[in-house]
Amino acid sequence: MPKFKSTQDILRIIGNKDQIRNFGVIAHVDHGKTTMSDSLLAASGIISPSVAGQALALDSMKLEQNRQMTIRGANVTLYYELGGKEYVINMIDTPGHIDFTGRVTRSLRAIDGAVVVCDSVEGVKTQTETVTRQALEERVRPVLYINKIDRLVKELRLTPEKMQQWLSNIISDFNRLISIYAEPEYREKWKVSIQDSTVAFGSAKDRWAFTFDVAGKSGVKFSDIYDAYVNNKPEVLIEKIPLHDAILSMVIKHHPPPHVAQAYRIPAIWKGDLNSDVGQSLLKCDDNGPVVMMVTNIVVDPQAGIVATGRLFSGTVVSGMTLNLIGAKRAERVQSVNMYFGPYREIVEKQTAGNIPASP
């Protein structure tokens, strides 16, 4: 995977909406989603690979670092190549703790797909069910990442055959949630399976993962995973099946680009007139339409002041333009347009529909 591209490269790529993906990471608390997010950042050259898993790069609030949990949704832009094509992937790491479900809902509004992280030993838990239900209500398509596979070997002492049986039960439990909570149109279409690579297995802590597709290319089998941990050599897996390849290829193949997603998501999440100019612009993810942005997070920056981050469903945000804040019933001027790089923001000229900009 190439190192992180320049801002200009990223802006060039996102001119084509087919090359954009907006996804989030959701899970029961402590199932490893922030560790997984850190590993994706490390692979993009944003943080050092040697500290991935400990750095908690997306947990930038001091309280989050101290409590070892994610409270706010955090944003990052990743670059990835698949099949010779370049992609820009906007990732949001959402809270997993039950106290912050309102913030999960706001984050879900901004994304089109979700990677649901599930602990291999604990399986589908109460909060796994809650966040999956929330995602499906927002018409956000889920894929499944079963994390901490090393626990099946080191703690449960399962053989490779027993591991596969155990994991099949978790997949069945997850698909049961989709049967219960998905709308009829998506109930079968969005179920996950090993064969179509909508399920990944791995260890975020040790930075490896694989899907059916990845296993086919790499030749890795469950017996290799078992041997790696029995012999205490998980590093051999990082070289063969790095985590970012499995997760990001799964996101690109199975999560829709923004203009495709908005065509079916807007009728569920926007209550206005779909036949109006605004409605049509939202459905088409139109860069030339009126600016409509759903704010998902507001922070106070010591230098920039109040910074709003959210999903731009329609229009183009440009520095200096005046926008109406519907909830606050007032107008404000956009001081600058920013894009996220890890926990940091970088000023860019503009952001077009389908992206997740930040604006002081």
Image (cartoon, helix red, strand yellow):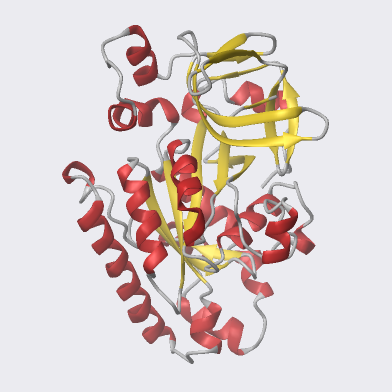
User: Can the viewer see residue 6?
Assistant: no
Specify whether 302 is left or right of 87. Answer: right
**Which residue appears at 28% of the width and 27% of the height?**
267
| Residue 65, picture quadrant | bottom right
Q: Residue 278 in the image: x percent, y percent?
A: 37, 12
Residue at the limit of the structure toward the right, as seen here: 303
Q: Is residue 163 above or below residue 37?
A: below
Specify whether 141 is left or right of 297. Answer: left
> Where the C terminus falls, by quadrant?
top right
Q: Is residue 86 above or below residue 210?
A: above
| Residue 92, picture quadrant | top right
User: Can the viewer see residue 340?
Assistant: yes
Q: Residue 337 in the image: x percent, y percent?
A: 68, 21
What number of labels is visible? 0
Specify whether 6 is left or right of 124. Answer: right
**Which residue appears at 31% of the width and 60% of the height?**
193
Specify whether 329 is left or right of 34. Answer: left
Residue at the limit of the structure toward the front, as seen here: 329
Q: Residue 250 in the image: x percent, y percent?
A: 46, 50
**Which residue appears at 43% of the width and 84% of the height?**
160
Residue at the limit of the structure toward the bottom, as seen here: 157
Q: Residue 269 in the image: x percent, y percent?
A: 34, 31
Q: Is residue 141 above or below residue 355?
A: below
Which of the pair 348/229 is nearer the observer?
Answer: 348
**Which residue appears at 60% of the width and 32% of the height?**
309
| Residue 183, picture quadrant | top left
Which of the pair 19/280 is nearer the observer?
Answer: 280
Which of the pair 181/144 is nearer the observer?
Answer: 181
